[in-house]
Image (spheres, helix red, strand yellow):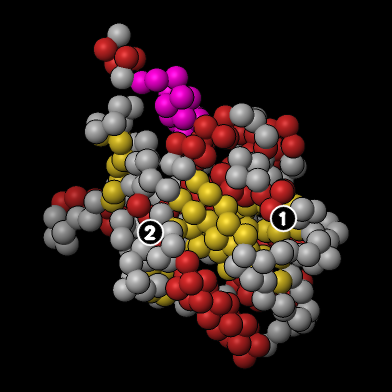
Amino acid sequence: MTFFSRLDLQEGLQIFSVLHVIPFCVILGGRHSAWVRNWAIWKYFKSYFPIKLVKTHDLSPKHNYIIGSHPHGILAHGAFINFTTEATGFSHLFPSITPFLLTLEWIFWIPLVREYVMSLGLSSVSESSVRYKLTCNGLGNAVIIVVGGAAEALLCHPGANTLYLKKHKGFVRLALQTGAFLVPSYSFGENEVYKQENFTEGTWLRLFQKTYQKPFKSLLGLSLCTFHGRGLTRGSWGFLPFNGPITTVVGEPLPVPKIDKPNQETVDKYHALYISALHKLFDQYKVEYGLLETQQLNII
């Protein structure tokens, strides 16, 4: 009874809402269900941190979009709650836009899990799936790509703002081939909700991590991160994320011409424009959402 006396009903519901998603994020299309996206549990999930979605510009339903989501963080909580549920009012902020958050393809081979994630609007990150959403599904579609991928999770530390982006140009090439506008977004606070352990080179823990990192990523597409958060009670140790605000700011759309076979020079040009827009977004909102003026966005 002592344990339960330390949790009020509101906090208990918030914790449950996060706990029920963690297995899918750790172990772990697009068939939207408005009913599932509007479940009350997502409101508790949002309030746990809390999480907020900020619009800076309209997204016209006359176009399709590729929204780059940064940073990956450990479990990308900001991208999940903002783009796969209505807890933060995506449809109200961006009317007539249908979001598809992209995730690993093998998840969609698991019965029941597949139906669950598809009802939220999650879709496979495979090229064929993305291309279908942007060319054969009408207009007003927005695919959300966590561009840094699993490797970027290893860069996730409180106070860190480092992205894997310099060599990640496939999403820009796909935007050019489909004519989808590019939209940068940044989730301030995403890297603050877990603490990740860094093992010293030469130790057996670092050797173990390096030995199993490659096969783990090859088999599941996930990085072998050693991280922790809080437990069921405040101040305890566990795998619940720390309570800290996450604010996802969606930037200005970057118009992209449709070119069936873009050359490398064109891809590089729009990749540079995207990075510039992301830097601008980060610098404009970093102080407002908890960072210091001196903190910089580091792209590698």
Quick one: 149 or 8, which is closer to the camera?
8
Q: Secondary structure at mark 1?
A: loop
Q: Is residue 200 left or right of residue 222?
A: left
**Left or right placement of residue 232 versus residue 281 in this view:** left
Q: Residue at x 52, y 71 (%)?
A: 281
- Which disc, if any, is residue 290? 2
Residue with the mark numbered 1: 94
Q: Is residue 207 left or right of residue 22?
A: left
Q: Choose mark 2 or mark 1, whichever is in front.
A: 2
9 drawn magenta? yes
Q: Position of residue 218 (x, y in %)?
A: 46, 55
Image position of 98 with respect to 173: above or below: above
Q: Looking at the image, which is closer to me, 66 or 208?
A: 66
Q: Position of residue 152 (x, y in %)?
A: 41, 61
Q: Position of residue 73 (x, y in %)?
A: 42, 54
Magenta stretch bounds? 7-21
- Give the answer, above or below, for where 170 lies relative to 72: below
> Which percent across, then down, holds residue 190?
42, 53
Give me the residue at 55% from left, 60% from top. Answer: 249
- Crowding near the residue tagged with mark 1, few <14, some 14–19, many ≥20 C-alpha atoms within 10 Å: some
Distance between the alpha carbons at the discs numbered 2 and 1: 25 Å
Q: Amino acid at mark 1?
A: Phe
- Which residue sits at x=73%, y=32%? 35
Q: Amino acid at mark 2?
A: Gly
Q: Is residue 230 left or right of residue 152?
A: left
Q: What residue is at 80 percent from the left and 53 percent from the top?
A: 96
Q: Is residue 79 magenta?
A: no
> Principal SS element in the magenta part?
helix
